[in-house]
Amino acid sequence: MKLLERVSLRTFLLAGILLPVGLIIAINAVSLYGKTLDAVNTAYDRTLLASAKSIGEQLDVTGYDEGAALRATVPYSALEAFEADVQTRMFYRVSDLHGRSISGFADLPPWTGRIPAQPPYAALVDFYDTSYRDSDVRVAVLLQPVASPQGRGMAVIQVAETLELRRRLTRRILLDFLWQQAALVGLIVLVVVVVVQRATRPVRRLSEELQSRSEGDLTPLPAAGAPRELLPLVDATNGVMSRLAHLLENQKRFVRDTSHQLRTPLAVLKTQVQSALRGDVEPRQALAEINDTVERATTLANQMLSLAKVEQLRQQGEESVSDLSAAVRAMALELAPLVADKDIDFDIETQPAPVQAHEWMLRELSRNLLHNAIKYTPPGGTLSVRVVADARTAALVVSDSGPGIAAELQPRLFQPFSAGDVRSGSGLGLAICHEIVRALGGAIELQNREKDRRIAGLDATVRLPLAQNRA
């Protein structure tokens, strides 16, 4: 299998075409040799039959039937007219029905066969192959009636011819056929090489273009001019490059944001430690400030890792069916101490809502929305959470009684670090929610809730397609 993987397209096509063509040529050559030999034998057998009839015309007989005595006056030179060339030799033998030799080559093996029921010619003749004097010969046997005023009898005339001429003619015809087939095979090889060379030119051009690119160049490959068969490959390659570009951009953004955002709390932490070492503040106050800075840095790092994990899970594409309501209730139970600390009037209402999503995504989405709502709901305020589902989508609605969001800030709330000044956070919570919802094919909306023309709170609404409608 590994050997086949290393075979070039040109070699594969040549082998795939030439092997069956060569097999067909070999079969045709064997068949042609047999048919040609039969045709040559048919043509030259006429000569043998004519030779036998010529000899039969020169026979004489005295006596009748069983008492008939045959005489033959046939000089060997009479057969020279039937010899095709100097390499062909002919032999003859005349005998009676009992096998007694009368004339010719007495050592020529007598005929022991029988006349076919339907002889090929209008005569009592039989043809067969045998060996004589270390040569392969073709023999014609003619049963010739002989009559004269003095008697009547039957003669057996055998005329043998060596096979050099027949075989030479057959080989010549076969070689002519093989030369023609060799020319055809050569033409096939030439056509395959030229066609493969031209057919693979777009592939080589794409390969050269990719090799000539600089590092980090993930622009799509041009599809113009590419053969129709290569378009799926070009599209798939462009799809991979697009995903790689997206991953690379996310990686750069993560490194950039991490280096930028973590620099500030680390610098503050270093200043606080140095101040504590110098004794500028009380140890308890210094430790409290350091603890607060560490908590903010930890929260920031965890949120940035969560943002990176969303992209990782989206690229994996391995999503199972999870219940949105179960994830929301689990997060509500986990954050219950924060609700109790602020004496918030909390209300939750859910119904089963199966969505195709990683469970961590749903929990992280619920955590950030609930945490933000709890954080900005005033003590003694109200907070409601609802999960509803219709025939196509599931909706998570988190309604707090906080100050809402200014209209000029809403367009950039889902951008990382853009909301930090508004709600004194890192500005990553809503960005994480937005990335999760986008990865799940849903939508998120933040809308101020008004009462008596005053902002009474904020409604955060997330809509996700149900599992059976995700495709």
Image: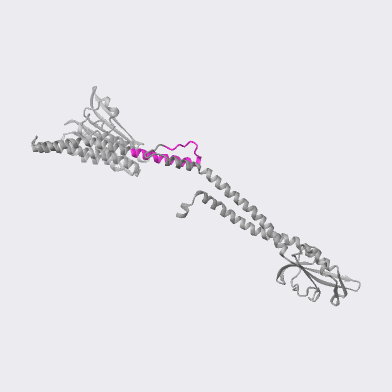
Please give left or right for residue 72 compared with residue 4 in the image: right
Q: Which residue is drawn at 85% across and 74% down?
A: 70
Q: Which of 335 and 432 is in front in this view?
A: 432
Quadrant of the rendering where the C terminus is positioned: top left
Up-down relation of residue 253 to residue 193 (above or below): above
Part of the protein shown in magenta: 220-248
Q: In which quarter of the image is residue 403?
A: top left
- Residue 210, position as x, y percentages in the image: 43, 41
Q: Nearer the viewer, residue 449 or 19?
A: 19
Q: Which of 448 and 385 is in front in this view?
A: 448
- Residue 36, position as x, y percentages in the image: 70, 59
Looking at the image, the residue that sits furthest to the bottom is 67
Up-down relation of residue 135 to residue 344 (above or below): below
- Residue 164, position as x, y percentages in the image: 71, 64
> Coloured how?
one colour
Up-down relation of residue 301 to residue 173 (above or below): above
Q: Is residue 217 rendered magenta in the image?
A: no
Q: Residue at x 91, y 72 (%)?
A: 149
- Residue 185, position as x, y percentages in the image: 60, 51
| Main SS, magenta residues | helix
Please give left or right for residue 55 compared with residue 197 in the image: right
Q: Quadrant of residue 212?
A: top left
Q: In which quarter of the image is residue 371?
A: top left
Please give left or right for residue 231 compared with residue 444 in the image: right
Please give left or right for residue 219 compared with residue 55 in the image: left
Looking at the image, the residue that sits furthest to the front is 86
Up-down relation of residue 107 to residue 370 (above or below): below
Looking at the image, the residue that sits furthest to the top is 453
Q: Is residue 350 visible?
A: no
